[in-house]
Image (cartoon, grey):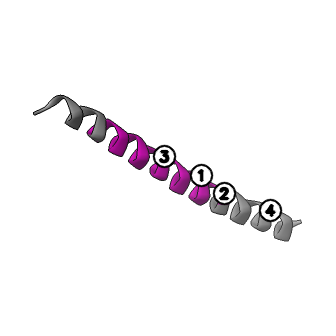
């Protein structure tokens, strides 16, 4: 392994982590919106 590949792998991992976090936040937003809608419909 040469010295440059570690940095490339780290950048790829950081990019993947950012994309995963974005997808998680999007899903969380959808769930919270659905829960809020259900709560509003029950009143």
Question: What secondary structure is the magenta-colored segment mainly?
Answer: helix
Q: CA distance from mark 2 to mark 3?
A: 17 Å
Does 15 appear above or below 34?
above
> Which residue is identified by label 4?
39
Q: Nearer the viewer, mark 3 or mark 1?
A: 3
Q: Where does the image place residue 7, in percent across and percent down from the top left?
A: 29, 34
Compare marks 4 and 1 and give the one earlier in the sequence: 1
Q: SS of the residue at dot 2?
A: helix
> Which residue is identified by label 3?
18
Give 32 or 39, whichever is nearer the viewer.
Answer: 32
- The residue carrying pointer 4 sits among few (fewer than 14), some (14 to 19) or many (20 or more) residues within 10 Å by Cα, namely few
The quadrant in which the C terminus is found is: bottom right
- Badge 1 vs badge 2, beta-carbon distance below 8 Å: yes
Give me the residue at 69% from left, 57% from top: 32
Q: Where does the image place residue 2, in percent across and percent down from the top left?
A: 13, 32
Q: Nearer the viewer, mark 2 or mark 3?
A: 3
Q: Nearer the viewer, mark 2 or mark 4?
A: 2
Q: CA distance from mark 4 to mark 3?
A: 31 Å
Q: Nearer the viewer, mark 4 or mark 1?
A: 1
Q: Which residues fall within the magenta stretch? A: 9-29
């Amino acid at each position: 392994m040469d010295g440059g590949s570690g940095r490339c792998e780290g950048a790829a991992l950081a990019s993947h982590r950012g994309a995963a976090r974005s997808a998680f936040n999007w899903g969380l937003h959808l769930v919270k919106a659905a829960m809020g809608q259900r709560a509003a419909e029950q009143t």
